[in-house]
Amino acid sequence: MEETNIRRRFRIRTRPYLCLTVAEAAGTGVTVSEETIEELTLVLNPGLGFYSMYAVVRNVPENEIKDIPAIKRGEIVFEKRNEAARYAKERGEPFVLCGVKTTRALTQDEISQAMEEAISDASIENKLKELKDFYRKV
């Protein structure tokens, strides 16, 4: 159902940088005053449409950038289109301008569920790594 010109990112409402997952956003340091994690639906290369915010993201598959920390990844949301366009131009390829189509605050239940899934996934990845290391030694 997800189109190739649509991307999803997450952020802590008061911070400009974008994250790939809810768990990554929560891991950037949610404090008492920063309790809201938002899901942003982004439209790549938005044309002349009007959007409430704009973002600049890397136009590459998520698996190529997931190991880069969110703060260093360079994916940022802006209030004004001209600021976002200038940032994208300065960064060059593979950064692209996006319009923020929708924003949605996640509930505490959604955040908790995403964190549990992330912990489970990390546990499985660690077990697979241990098995690979074991078989290399054998």
Image (cartoon, rainbow, N blue to C red):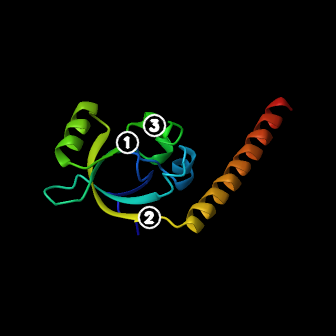
- Pointer 3 local density, CA inside 10 Å: few below 14, some 14–19, many at least 20: few
Counting residues from the start of the chain, the first of labels 2 and 1 encountered is 1
- Pointer 1 local density, CA inside 10 Å: few below 14, some 14–19, many at least 20: many
State which mark lies toward you, 2 or 3.
2
Disc 3 versus disc 1: distance between alpha carbons?
8 Å
Q: Splitting the image into 4 quarters, where does residue 7 fall?
A: bottom left
The quarter of the picture where the C terminus appears is top right
Residue 122 image offset from top left, x and y in percent: 68, 48
Q: Residue at image x 16%, y 55%?
A: 47
Query: Which of 6/28 is in front?
Result: 28
The three-letter code of the residue at mark 2 reads Ala
Residue 101 image offset from top left, x and y in percent: 29, 62
Q: Residue at image x 51%, y 56%?
A: 35
Residue 116 higher or lower than 72, as above or below: below
| Pointers 2 and 3 in contact (C-beta within 8 Å) | no
Q: Secondary structure at mark 2?
A: strand
- Pointer 2 local density, CA inside 10 Å: few below 14, some 14–19, many at least 20: some
Query: Which of 67/26 is in front?
Result: 26
The three-letter code of the residue at mark 3 reads Ile
Disc 2 versus disc 3: distance between alpha carbons?
21 Å
The quarter of the picture where the N terminus appears is bottom left
In the picture of the structure, the residue carrying the numbered disc 3 is: 71
In the picture of the structure, the residue carrying the numbered disc 1 is: 75
Residue 90 image offset from top left, x and y in percent: 24, 31
In the picture of the structure, the residue carrying the numbered disc 2 is: 105
Counting residues from the start of the chain, the first of labels 2 and 3 encountered is 3
